[in-house]
Structure formats: C-alpha cells, structure tokens
Image (tube, coloured by chain):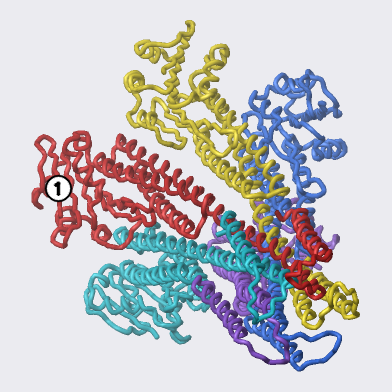
Chain colours: A red, B yellow, C cyan, D blue, E purple
C-alpha cells in the first residue's frame, strides 16, 4: 500500500498522489512530500527507482527481508536510514523489531516497511493533519517526529522489564525454582537484545545531530540531539536492569547451593545420630532376651536408653561446636 | 516555589523579584541574578520561557519527571546542565538521586528541581548572603559553589559504604549467612549505581573545566577542575570498594562450599564407621545368644569388640592417609 | 592450474592466455584481465613475479601454507588482499577457512588459492561470461563481485548455527546430558572462530570502502560499503547467537546442580525416615518375641506401628516446614 | 618541620633558610632551592601561599588528609604533582600509600607530605649533599631524582608479592585450606590496589616525559621516560602476578570440589557395600539360630559369607566399570 | 665475548675488530658494522659508551638483569630496541624469555644479550657470511633479518601448544584427573605470558614499519611490515588456543560436577532401596522364628520377599519417573 501526503508551500494539502504528481512535487523546493510504502508489492516498489531515483543498493536494503542493524548512509542528495521499532510481547521473552527504512531528502520523506503496521508512522500520519508544526518545518522535522514517536515506544518496554525484574527478585527470595531461572535468563536475553538495538540507533541519531547533512538544518539538530539524550537515558536504565538481573541470578544460584547445604545438614544430623544408635541396638540385642509381655524391667534397659540419649546429645553438641548449624 | 536573589553591581541585594524585575536584572551585564524554582507548579514554570526565553526542549527536560542522566547542553548564550544530588538511606540499599537542572548564563543562574529540597542549593543559598566571595565572582563561580556542595555530599556516602563493607567482611569471615549475602549484593548494586552517576557527572564537570564556554572564564575553570579531581578521587575509592565487595562475595561463596565439605566429611566419617559396625553386630547377632543377666562373659565378646575397634581405627586411618581431614 | 579471462575494450573475450598475451593485456588500460591460479604448482607460480612483477613478500604470503588472517596491503600500483572463504561441516564443530589471495590492479585481478576449489571464485567465473555488468565495470567491480559472493556464503553458516542452538536449547531444557554440553561448547568455539574471521574481514572491506586507492573509484566504494554492512549484520547476528549459547550453557550448568539437589533430596527423605524406623525396629526386637505363626496379636504391635507412622509423618512435616521441598 | 637547601649558582650550599631568604632565592634564575615541608603544622604551611604564592586550590590539595589519586596540574609558572610512595607491611595484606605533593618551578622544588617520613625524600636529601649531579642539573633533574627513588621502592613490593604467590601456589597444591584462600584473596586485593596506583602514576610520568612544560628541558624528558619505562615494567610484572593469583584461586576452588568428590566417593563405596550386607545379615538372622558356643558350623554360614563377598565384589566391579574410581 | 663483523663498501669483510677499528668503521657511511656483545663482562661493556657513545640510560637498560618489556626508544642518531626471544621447555610449563638489546644506527648494528646464546643472532651470524643479500642492504635490513629469525622461533612454540591442548582435550574427555587440570592451568599461564610478550613486540615492530626513522628506509619498512603481519598471525593463533584452553577447562570442571552427580546417584539408589528393606527385615525378624535347618518353608517368607521386591521396584520406578536417571 502506498500512502502519500503533499504540502505545497501555498496550497492545501493533497492526498494519494500519482507518480507524475510526485515527480512534480519533488521539483518544488519549498513544499514537503511524504510517501509511505507500507508492505508494498512489486507493482508499488518501482516508484523508489522510477520517481525518486534512489540508488539500487539502498532499494535492495529496503526490500531485503532479513535482519539489518540500524545505520545511516549518505547518498549526497538524500540520506538513507534504517531504524528499528520494537514490539514486545507481554511476557518480555521475545523482542520483535520492525525495520523502518527512511529516505530523507531536502523536500521529501519516504518511509518503507514490510510486515505489520509500524505504530510511530501511523501516529505521525494522524498528527500531521492537525499539527501544523510538523508539516511546516521541513522534511528534517518530519523525520524527527517519526523517530521521536519511535523512540517514545522504547520506554514502556523498559518499564515492563522493570516490573518483571522486580517480580522476579521477590520470587527468587521467596520461592526460587527453575521456572524463575528460565524467566530470568529470558529477561537477560531481552535486555541484551534491546541494548544491541539501542547502541546502533544511538549512533545513527548521534550522526544526524552532529554531522553536516544538507537536508538537516542547525535548528533541527537540537531536536535530534534531544532524541539522542532520550536514547542515552534508555541505555542507562537498561544497564541498571541488566545489573539487577545479574544480581538476581547470583541470588538464585546461591540459593540453590544453600538449599543443598540445608538438605545435607538434615541428612547428616539424622544419619550421624541414628547410625550409632542402630549399632547400639544391634549390640544390646545380642545380650538381652527380655520376654515380652512379662514387663520385667531390667536396669540394663535404663543403661541402654541412657547411652542412646548420650550418643544423640554428644553428636548434636559436636555439630554445634563445629559451627555446622 | 520560586526564590530569587539579585546582586546588582552597586546596590544592595534584593529578594523575591517579580517577573519584570527579573527581566530588568537580566539586562545588567555586571549584576548577578539567581532564581531557584523549587518544586514549581504550572503557574511558576512559565518564567523559564517568558522571562528567560529558554529553548522548549531544555524546559521540557526540566519538567520531565523521569530519570535523566547528567549532561551538559550548549545553547549559545546559556548552557543547560542536569546534575544529580545523591541521597542514601541508612542501610545503603537504595541510592536516591535528585535531579537538579541548572541554566548558567553570563549574568544569571537558574536552578530547577522537583521533589524534596536539594541540600546543596539550600546550603549555598544560606552561604551566599554572608559570603561575598560567592556573590561577587560571577555566575560561573556561583554555579561552581552549588556543584561543589553537591559533590561534597557524595563523600559521606562512600564513607558509609566503606563502613558497611568492613562490617560485612567481618561478618562473612565469622558467621556467613544468606542475609549477609543479600546485603553484599545490595551494596554491590549501590556501588554500581553510584559509579553510573559519577561517570557522566565527571564528564559534565570535565567539559565545564576544559571546553570554552563564554560564561565560564579561565580562572573559574581551575575551580571546576578541582571538582573534577574530587570526582576522580571518589571514582577511585568506589573502585576499591567494588573490588572489596567482589572479594567478600568470593569468600562468602567459597565458605558455602567449604561448609558443605565439612558437613559431608562428618556424615562420611560416621557412616563409614557405623555401617560396617552395624553389619558386624548383625552377623554376630546370629551366632551369639547370651542370656542376660547371667553375665557369663564369653571370650567371643572380646573378639567382637576388638573387631569393632579395629574397623573404626582402620577407617579413620584410611581417611587420614587419603588426606580427607 | 591457471585459468585466465581477458576482456579487451573492443574485442571478444579471450580464454587461457599465454604469458606473453598476459603481458600484452596488462598494457591495455581499458581492458580487464582476470587470472586465477588454482592450486598452482611451481611451474605456474612464476607468473606472479615474471608477468605481474609482484613484490616478493606478497608472493611469499600467497604461497605460504599456514593460516594467515585477512589483511590488505597497499603496494602502490596494486593492492594485495587476503580474505577467507568459510566452509562448515554439517555438524558445525569445525569451521574450515579457505584463504583466497587477491591482487587488484588498475586493469587486472589475480586470484590465488591452494587446496579445494573456492566456490565464490567458481561462481563469479561462471557468471562473468553471461553477465556483462561484471566484465564491463572494471577490476574493482569484479573484485567486489568475488568478495560479495564470498560474504554471501557466510550467511548460511549463521543460519545453521541458529538452528543448532535452537535445537540445543530445547535439548537442554528437556534432557540435558554431557553430550549436549559438548555440542554447546563446540558451537561456542565455532561462533568464536567465526567472529575472529569476520572482524578482520570487516576491517579489510572497511578500508576498501573508505580509503583512497587509485584502482577503486568512488562509485565502487558504495558497493564495498554494501559488503561492509552485510558483514556488520553477520557480526550482529553472531553476537546474538553467542549470547544464546552462553545462556544455554548457564541453563545446562544450573540444571546439573538442580539435579544434584533433587537426588540429594530423595536420599535425605528416605534416609531420615528409615534410619529412625530401623532403630525403632531394633529396639522393639529386643523386647518382643512373638512366635509366628501363632498370630497372637499384641497391642504393642500397634504401639510400634503407631510410632513408625508418627516418626515418618514427623520427619516429612519437618522437611515441609523447613521448605526443603 | 621545614627543611630547606639552597644551591646558589656560585656560592656554597645554604641550609634552613628563613622566609625572606627563600624569597630572595626564588629571584635567582640559575640557583636551585629545595624546600621540604614534612608533617607541617599551621604555622609552617603559610609559606606555600606567602613565599611561593601557590594557587589556593593546590595548597588545599596539599593539606587535605583524604586519599587523592596521582595527578599533575599545570599552573603556568609551576606544576603541581601528587605522587604516591607505597609502603607494604610484611604480610602484604595492606598496601599503605603515602601521598607526596610536589611543586616544581623553574628554579625550585617544594615537597610536602604529612604522616611518616617518606623514604625517597630522605634518600635524595642525603644524596644531594655529596652527589653534585643532582644539585647542578636544575629543578627538573632533582624532581626526577625524587620520583626515581620513589619508583625504585615499588620493585621490592613486586618481589615480595612474587615470593608470596609462589609460596601460596605450593601451599594450594599440597594442603589447601581456608586460610590459604584468605591470603590469596588478600594478595589479589594488594595487587589490584597496586595496579590502581601505578596506572595514574604512569600517566603522570608519561605527561612529564611527553608534554611541554617550560621547567622541564628536553634532556630531562629522557630521564622521565626512563621512569616511565620502569613503571611499564612494574605494571607488566603485576599483570603476571595477577594472572598467577587467579590461576592459584582456580586450583584452590577446584581442589575444594575435588575433595568433596573424594569424600563422597568414600561414603558411596562404604554405604553401597554395607547397606546390602546389613540387609543380608538381617534376612539370615531370621532363619538361623546357631547357639554359640556349640561351634556347629553349618554350610549355610558359608553360603552367607559367599553372598556377602559376592555383593561387595559386585558393587566394586560396577563402580569400576562406571568409571567412578 | 665480543664478536664483530665489518663489511666495508669496497673491501673484503673483516672479523673481530679492535676498538679503534670500530671507531674508524663508524665513520664510513656506506659500510656496515655489526658488533655483538654476548654475555659481556665489565671490561667489554665499556665500548657501548666509549666507541658508540650511547646514552647512559640505554646502556643501563642493556646491562640491567631484571625483566624488561619490549620497547623502542628513539635517540635521534640511533634507536634502541629491547626484543624478546622465547625459549620453551618441552612441557610448555615455563616460557623463558631471553632479552635481546639492539642498537640500530645508520651504518651499524649492535646486539647485546646476557645469559645463554640467543639462537636468532647465531643463525644470522652464520647466514650473513654466505648470503650477500643480508650484508649489502644496510643496517636496517640486517636488523630485520635478526628480528625475522627471532619471530620465526615463536611459531614452533604455538605449534607445541597446539599439540599439548589437543592431547589435553582428549584426556579431559576420556579420563579427567587433577594432573590434567594442572597442565591445563599451566598451559593457560604459558599462553597468557606469550600474549603479553607478543603484544608489545607487535607494537615495537609496528613502530619500525610505520614511524619515520632516518636509519630505516621506505623499502625496509615493507619487510618490517611483513614481520608485523607474522606477529598478528601468531597473536590470532594464540587467541584460538586460549579459547580452546578455556573451553577444555569448562569441560573439565563440568565433568567434575557430573561425576559427583553420578556418585550421588549410585549412593542414592542403593540407600533408598536397602534402607527400607533393612527396616522390613528388622520388622519381620520380630515376628518370625524359623528354626534352621528345619527348612519348614513358611508362606510368610514369600510375603516378605514379595514386599522386598515391591519396595525395590517401586523405588526404581519413582526415580525413573522423576527423571533422575
């Protein structure tokens, strides 16, 4: 599907332009043309080469289905960006990234994506119709609006991760089990993936806010710088989460070996008390032959029980002294 | 709440200026105006744009409630700083950071914060009234005074952490238990958080002491350099604490497995002695039938006990030779 | 074996040139000569020095049988590249790298390799005959075609590794055993080796796309940049795989100690129940002497069994309360 | 205490100058004045500001009692150095660092320290009286002499650590116990502290040997470079020691778990042999009733013992086959 | 011992020059003088200062007996190199490094070493007499020949390590024992030491091939670049070995805990089967009193054995279901 919006400098906005209208629009330096190719089929992608004349390699990158890290390529009269929207399922186990390809020219913006609708594009598409600030400040400001909406979507993911790790931390302290461990490892993967997306994103935005591109004016750079600060903050928070995840894992692993210690202590106490007692009973069994139910209590019985109590008490005392519990 | 102080070049200090008085003050290059917005409500924040004409993005950063890492933004006629005061609760488990936003212009300083009173601002506010050095050396020196007071508050936190880790180290050597482990992990988190705040703070101060900003003169740079050295020192000390924390954790974890060894040694000794003895008693039980209380001591009894002692001694000897204890 | 192709500027392609024909071809600036030395014997390698006049050190590197990391050497009128094709056996345990030596001059390309046929060279050799784009764009584009085909072969390896680690992850969760561990470690080695090849490859391609070499024109640089992006993507994916491998290893190791805990719990429960019961039976055995098969049931029997049940239930209750299971 | 030495260009050396004599000495560009403030009280420190006119911040750093990392500050007409002498107690558990503050001017050197006598200062003080090379080569050479003597004191510490780790390595292989572990951890801390001092020291000396300071001439730079090489060597050696310490820790930790394996093996062998035998004795005990001392040997006895031997041998055979020992 | 060789530009080679002959040789710009001080005594080292006039610090470094890392010092008319020959004993436990000091001037080379003969020096000494290429290409080419011979000696060490780790890998999989572990740790140390020597060596050679020294002409730089590539390759291979060593260690450590699991499983199975059986035998023992050898088989016997089999089978079934084996 192709959607397009055209803001001529002194005329009302136009929708859904034809190829020829687009070509005409491109020749107006003061106008702004936004074309969005959403899940385009083969009959639609030709406008990238035919209307906009983009470099074959950039078009190939656009249409490639595999994973491609964020990057910025400078082709002189336009720059080509790959950025990533992130979508997290509710359990934070998988982070899905949706690639958004952006061509930013002096007076136009082309956004291309495959697969599901990318929310930030949709959001800006709706806002641009009523918010004159976006449509009147040039293609660089429009590009900033899209990227800003995209980066704004990262924050709720960090928040969700924050809640997940808090819940996991409590879980580990109260009732550690292997499923908790799996969720911790899952969260660790997610945070690692997130960091791997944010780092090149940050680099892309950094270049936009720092390098000199003809289509980005000085004023807009401050806005890209703001997105950059936002990403730094997100990276900072993700570092904190990663640290807490590692700490939680340490507590979990230590709790595993502490439980082993507890289990072995129980076994040791019972064994070291009852093995000697069993031997004692065996030895006495040879010497006695008290016929029940004559109940002729023999003083030797008291000697026997006295020895049992003495052995048990002695063992417990030894453990206590050795500091084993 | 808005507090303001105005030091005209040749007139007595004025308090609590109106918006118009502020505007007038800003036009006096030799004067010094300090405006502090403390937990400002909506009717108060407008002066940032109306009186001082700050950039919308900087104002947005100011009023944002989320966590923002320390940074410095250069807006030409003024610079915008985000710095962090740290507040530690008594158990060092959580480090709270209070964000302080500073606008530093040629002849004014604007400090903005939300939430609780930030102590360094309060401190400098009291000192400036009686210490002419702060009010007479320009806005850069005043900014230095605030930052210096803020960094001075980091040191006691390091000291507290130092005491905590010393106590924990003793605890781990004497009586390691899971609660000690939790405190160690807590301290590790705190020290990591602290390092994550100090690193960008250091970078911010480094830029103030090194880059050329028109509102910071060469003389003041030496003072910012002093704060920078202070932060380097704090980072150094926090590295040391982090190392000791790691070492303490190692001792703790090793003590866990050493205790398991001790427990298992006890179990093994008792089991390997009494299991054979129990068998021996069982075997002899078949052959004897000494009727108690006839006390007819049989030489076989001595053979039995002799074997028991021999088995026990043999087992102990084998353990000793195998170096198991 | 020597294979050669010569594309004169205005004449049909020639095959299998003699030494003198090659020398003649080199003097035509607008033509393109491709010579491929495949597993050359001593009578063939002399053309490197006699016809092309390459530096002795570069020739030595070419003919060296040992492992040599990817690199690019600038000899002024030509550049010398060492790049690596990767071949993985089906089980991903060993990654074999095949070294390809490339001399890139203004109007010629010389490829040299030892051992098995290197697929990318073969592929381009076939394509060049029918794809005029490769033969008409100069030696730099031809070089790009070979390198592109080579880097395209890396991707299936990443895919295979991805499948392997997914299978291993399931295996570890369902039925961890030492062989799984060995395969995880094997995969970890492979991914490490891959990363060690890709990093210098990336650096080589980066230099080709960035530095100024007389035989690489600006237009071709964009194509090398495309290969570079491709390698960045592969490195990114290999980072992800490495993370999952580490996570899988963690789950495996934790599962080992969890199983130990399970085993010890079983032992402890059975021991702590039956050791006291055994003692009890021993003690009662002294006092009873019920002649079977008289079936004279004695109330003491009920007392005995009552005590047994009480001991077992008490032990289980204690374990439950201590949270051991 | 203040000690001072004054070497006029053409007059004999003078001792213990008054404030005014110092001021006079400073005005002689060809002379050399060395003032050493050792544990100065308040009545002595004033000369830093009154006589030498040092910057208040440098003086504050001088008199500060807290830990300060090595650094070099350039104040134009003089440079201010903080360097660290290291003192190790005999057991290497704590490394004490003694801060030495140095002001190096064109024709003077001021050394300031608090606490115990710093040996390198004392050493150079003695040598300067009889070694004309130190007093005749300017303040930069004198400064080099002090720093050289200081760095020379690092080497014996490395040597001591080397001996300690060798002893510990032997200990760990022969008889690992928790005290050894504590000493290893202690040594690890020491080596980490040492590295943290040496790194900034190296940086300080590097700047002295590389940057252009007016009071350090080209000839002296080679001497500072020599100290720098010395520090690189020490850092190298400390890296080696750190590696051996880590390796020793690994051996220790592995020995702990190996011993657990040995202990459990002993327990398992004895248990798995005697538990079945005990059962066997119990079962036979029901069926026999041989009255001792009638010595009527029964063939069943041989059957019983045969079964015992068979069970024991069978168990041992199973263990052997399973490779458990 | 001093050995010297002098190649005048147009006269035959001379051996064993006197001090004065050396001085004369130094004044011939087109000649080449090589002086090798091998294990020199005090009467021989004076030529470094008297004949060659080297800087006292360089001479001190030369004669210093302690360990010194590779470095290059530029003294204007000559450069001073410290490089390391490596000698490995057959078991790879210790890597001995032999320091070689080299002074490289415009028309001379001075090599100095203490201790055993350094093979590369000997090798080049022999080759130079018959290989005119070494003697006719200037001091820089001669220096390259020595360094090349030295770096060529590193490769066999890498090969030996490769064999050792392959053997250890097999050993760990088949029969891991603590001695294997010690050899692995030993190999790890060796590879770490090797890396620590190679890194600065690489840096030294890199500077020779990149920086501008008057005594190294552009042509020779390519040769030093070749040595540099050689060192990069060795470092690459040593990285691979280090990875395999780490992996082998992981397998070993995991095998230790897997064996513990196996041992405990054996103990648990036997204990949980025979402890209940022992109790059963004890209980039945109270009720039976079958007089052997009357062989009056009682149906209760079958009940007893039936219960025994049921308990054992039940336990095994429970284990199976719990997935413990």
The residue under label 1 is A4
Q: Which quadrant would the N terminus of chain C be assigned to in this image? A: bottom left
Give SS at disc 1.
strand
Frontmost residue, E289 versus A197 = E289
Residue A93: name its quadrant: bottom left
Q: Residue at x 50, y 58 (%)?
A: A177
Residue lying farthest to the bottom in this orientation: D299
Q: Is residue D85 above or below residue E54?
A: above
Q: Where does residue E198 sit, x and y in percent of width and height?
A: 62, 63
Q: Residue at x 56, y 53 (%)?
A: A250
Residue A168, compared with residue D285, is above or below; it is above
What percent of the width, then of the height, locates residue A195?
42, 51
Q: Residue D130 sits in which quadrant?
A: top right
Observer able to see residue C85: yes
Q: Which residue is drawn at the image coordinates 38% and 44% (left, top)?
A: A206
**Between D181 and E83, the one nearer to me in the picture:** D181
Q: Is residue E155 visible?
A: no
């Amino acid at each position: 599907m192709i959607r397009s919006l055209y803001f001529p400098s002194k005329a009302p906005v136009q929708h859904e332009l034809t190829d020829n209208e687009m070509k005409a629009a491109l020749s107006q330096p003061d106008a702004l043309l936004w074309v969005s190719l959403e899940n385009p089929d083969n009959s639609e992608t030709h406008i990238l080469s035919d209307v906009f004349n983009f470099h074959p390699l950039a078009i190939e990158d656009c249409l490639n289905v595999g994973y491609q890290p964020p990057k910025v390529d400078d082709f002189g009269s336009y720059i080509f960006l790959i950025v990533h929207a992130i979508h997290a399922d509710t359990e934070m186990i998988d982070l899905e990234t949706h690639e958004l390809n952006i061509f930013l020219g002096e007076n136009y913006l082309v956004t291309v994506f495959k697969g599901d609708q990318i929310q930030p594009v949709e959001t800006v598409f709706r806002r641009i119709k009523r918010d004159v600030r976006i449509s009147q400040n040039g293609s660089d400001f429009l590009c900033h609006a899209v990227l800003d909406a995209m980066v704004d979507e990262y924050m709720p993911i960090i928040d969700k991760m924050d809640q997940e790790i808090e819940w996991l931390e409590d879980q580990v302290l109260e009732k550690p089990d292997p499923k908790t461990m799996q969720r911790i490892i899952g969260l660790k993967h997610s945070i690692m993936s997130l960091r791997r997306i944010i780092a090149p994103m940050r680099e892309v935005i950094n270049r936009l806010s720092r390098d000199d591109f003809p289509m980005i004016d000085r004023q807009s750079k401050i806005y890209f710088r703001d997105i950059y600060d936002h990403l730094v903050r997100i990276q900072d928070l993700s570092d904190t989460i990663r640290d807490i995840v590692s700490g939680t894992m340490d507590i979990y692993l230590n709790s595993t070996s502490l439980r082993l210690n507890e289990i072995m202590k129980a076994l040791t106490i019972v064994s070291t008390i009852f093995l000697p007692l069993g031997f004692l009973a065996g030895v006495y069994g040879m010497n006695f032959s008290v016929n029940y139910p004559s109940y002729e209590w023999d003083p030797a019985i008291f000697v026997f029980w006295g020895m049992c109590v003495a052995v048990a008490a002695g063992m417990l005392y030894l453990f206590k002294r050795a500091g084993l519990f």
